[in-house]
Amino acid sequence: MQYDFAAIEKKWQDNWEKTKPYRAVTGDKTRKKFYGLIEFPYPSAAGLHVGHPRPFTALDVVTRKKRMEGYNVLFPIGFDAFGLPTENFAIKNHVHPAVVTQENIKNFTRQLKMLGYGFDWDRCVDTTDPQYYKWTQWIFLQLFKHGLAYKTTMPVNWCTSCKCVLANEEVVEGVCERCGSEVVRKEKSQWMLRITKYADRLIDDLDDLDFIERVKIQQKNWIGRSTGTEVTFKTNMGDDVTVYTTRADTLFGTTYMVISPEHPLLKKWKDQIANWAEVEEYQAAAARKSDFERGELNKDKTGVRLEGVQVINPVTGGVLPMFVSDYVLMGYGTGIVMGVPGHDQRDWDFAKKFGLPIVEVVKGGDVTKEAFVAKDDKAIMVNSGFLNGMTVKEAIPAMKKYAVEQGWGKEKVNFKLRDWVFSRQRYWGEPIPLVNCEKCGWVAIPESDLPLVLPKVESYEPTDDGESPLSKMTDWVNTTCPCCGGPAKRETDTMPQWAGSSWYFLRYMDPHNDKELVGKEAEEYWGPVDWYNGGMEHTTLHLLYSRFWHKFLYDIGVVHTKEPYAKRTSHGMILGKNPHYVGNAKTEEEKQALREKYGAQAERPAVKMSKSLGNVVNPDDVIKAYGADTMRLYIMFIGDFEKTASWSDEAVKGSKRFLDRCWNLMDRVTDDPEISQQNMAAVHKTIKKVTNDIDELKMNTAIAALMALVNDFYAKGLSKGDLEALLKLLSPFAPHMVEEMWELMGYAQKYGKMCMQMPWPGYDESKTIDATAEMAVQVNGKLKGTVVVPTDSDEQTVVAAAMELEKVKKSTEGMTVVKTILVKNKLVNLIVKP
Ligand code: ANZ
Ligand code: ZN
């Protein structure tokens, strides 16, 4: 009998649609709960990308196994559907964004169902549904009522292409995170959320979470807590100046001062600064630059000396000059720094350029060549009066103490994190439920008026003047004040795309509740999310924002846990073939041409998929050709989950062949009890391996173990019991094919259950022990370590084991294995090429 995947997949998907085996039951006390979450997709017009199935399938496998282990599983899905791409698509094609959104959601739903995911579709949410965003608006109102939302005018990041403001988190390396366009500064009045009030808790509470280390580090760095000293200097201008420094120990080495171009003191001193015109010109030039251009990357320091300004160094009594320079940012510390060229590279670069003295106060380098930044804090202080002979570690608190006693210093904690710029001048977002009244100022609309529905407008094109499209809807804008009944105007900016996703995991727990955003019982039962997988690119965006909102909801008693997610993992990207890869060129000339035209990109065999490179893989095509189970299996077998992996059509076929082999095992099953005995060790070992590997997201090695088991079955034969065990282990990966085989083999009738409803197979440690072989692992002939594998393991098993060695991972990263040399039970040699 043929493995007719198309018919089989359709049959089982129809069955699941009707019988709903993935329904999560709120409040079921007879089972433990497990809440698995993937980042809900943005329903773009392009449809599902092959990048989506990687995390989706991984958590589908995890949650399927959990169900078989007896858990009451919540594995939900929804759509994060507000946002710019849809709005831009709608503008270009002259359809309303709401219409586009519904079409896209329909298409995504079709594709997700086709992949056989065990989502509880009855809990599906759509952030653009007024019944959903009613609660997004409700949360905003609570933030407003608690003083955590405020409007202020300040220079903000403005994307020249999206024509709207961006949060700091949305500016990546100086460009718009979404469209890659230039970001400039613009003075605008904006709604802000006081995320900074949660800065300490957002760092401290990470300690108790099971997040991968990279995520914790990135969040901590972004929040950037720094403990230092504020030091106040006397000047001849009638005002003292205060700096923030983490290196109070270097005060004796301070040879000049720098003030940020935006600092308000400058204007105040205007008449006393002899070269004011020059300063003003410099301020104007700085205003045109982004923080990014002014920061780290900029080696060529610029600035203007403030003529007539004198600052007194409190420890040496020396007179210091003061400069205005754009490498000092107004948004951090006090906006003024003390220049210590001997020990800060930025200051060193500046001092060199302006011919300022460089004084060594920490021993260990040659400050005439570059700044000496002590690697550890054991370096010794010199030229520093009472600090001489101390280590840096001792000198910092000693100077701090002295400064405090003398009355010109105090301890200070600073954060890099800024408040969250929360308004957008675009149409396709949640309306902000506030009105502005001449008498009462900003007033919340009554909660009973929620949702404040996004009105239909004639034109939703963004404007260059930075006014939201809603501002032209005068009928909608003009309203009455809920407070005094007088005339008032609605806020016309909308919320950013990150609003709806900041709390969606709560709605899944109780999606149809029209009284509360989530009911107490449901939240207490399901919260927190047990396992959340998502992209690294969201670490300092969605992941941070949603932790902030959740903490706020905790503070006002809506949720019972401080943190929304107990565990966070992250997947690598799926890359496509690089059409410009030099490795594909036949002649030297061709190679040279590619290098000239594409530079570094020509050296990479695989690159990010994109329309322009023609290397995008559409899941629909793969499913059509090989079936969803092959797609699922392949995307799990593709490589280490956390790392990037390259799509290969050949390897997809390999996964299909494996499923064919599984299918054909049905013809080989016997009732011979001898065979069952023979396979015992292999079966138990595989159960152990697959069980542990799934928990650690090592889906590739779990599949390799299943492949080895199937090879064993082909070599030695298999019993009905052996096949039953295999099907259970394979069920999370290839659920359609497994259910069909389960039925054909008569198990469905025997147990009255689908395979996915059976208990997960257990193993007996004593039965897993089997003769093993320690094998040497080489890469290109060089010894990298050894692996212990079952005696007579085949190539696939040995290679899979070898690939788990750190050293092998390192030396094969980005390479292709072109050949494998296997000396059974002794050695494996991987021949790799870039
Ligand atoms: C003197 C000094 C000497 C510094 C030295 C560093 C090394 P973190 O750790 O990131 O908090 N700084 C302070 N405010 C600044 C601003 N608005 N713009 C640019 N730089 C600013 O960094 C604190 C250090 O960054 C401070 O300590 C200050 O330079 C600089 F050997 O003061 B330091
Ligand atoms: Zn009023």
Image (spheres, rainbow, N blue to C red):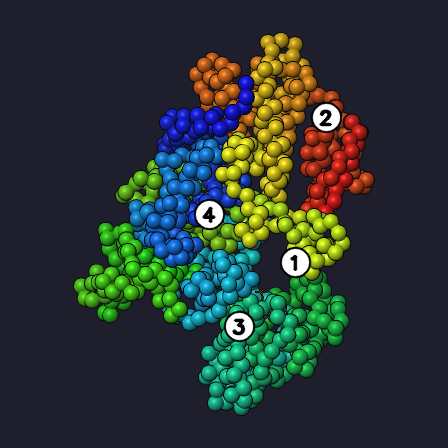
* Residue 28 to residue 194: above or below: above
Q: Is mark 1 within 8 Å of ligand 1?
A: no
Q: Quadrant of ligand 1?
A: bottom right
Mark nearer the viewer, 4 or 2: 4
Q: Is mark 2 within 8 Å of ligand 1?
A: no
Q: Judge whether residue 610 can be spotted in this image.
A: yes
Sequence-first tag of 4 and 1 = 4
| Direction from residue 275 to residue 188 in the image, left or right | left
Cα distance, mark 1 to mark 3? 29 Å
Q: Which mark is residue 289?
A: 3
Sequence-first tag of 4 and 3 = 4
Q: Is mark 1 on a helix, strand or loop?
A: helix
Residue 805: x and y in percent read 71, 39
Q: Which mark is residue 236?
A: none
Cα distance, mark 4 to mark 2? 44 Å
* Residue 130 to residue 479: above or below: above
Q: Residue at x 55, y 67 (%)?
A: 292
Q: Is mark 3 within 8 Å of ligand 1?
A: no
Sequence-first tag of 1 and 2 = 1
Mark nearer the viewer, 1 or 3: 1
Q: Do the residues labelled 4 and 1 touch (CB within 8 Å)?
A: no
Amino acid tagged 1? Tyr
Q: What element carries label 3?
A: loop
Q: Is mark 4 within 8 Å of ligand 1?
A: no
Q: Name the residue under label 1.
A: 598
Amino acid tagged 4? Ala
Q: Name the residue under label 2.
A: 793
Q: Judge whether residue 21 can be spotted in this image.
A: no
Q: Residue at x 48, y 18 (%)?
A: 743
Q: Mark 4 points at which residue?
A: 46
Q: How many numbered callouts?
A: 4
Q: Is mark 2 on a helix, strand or loop?
A: loop
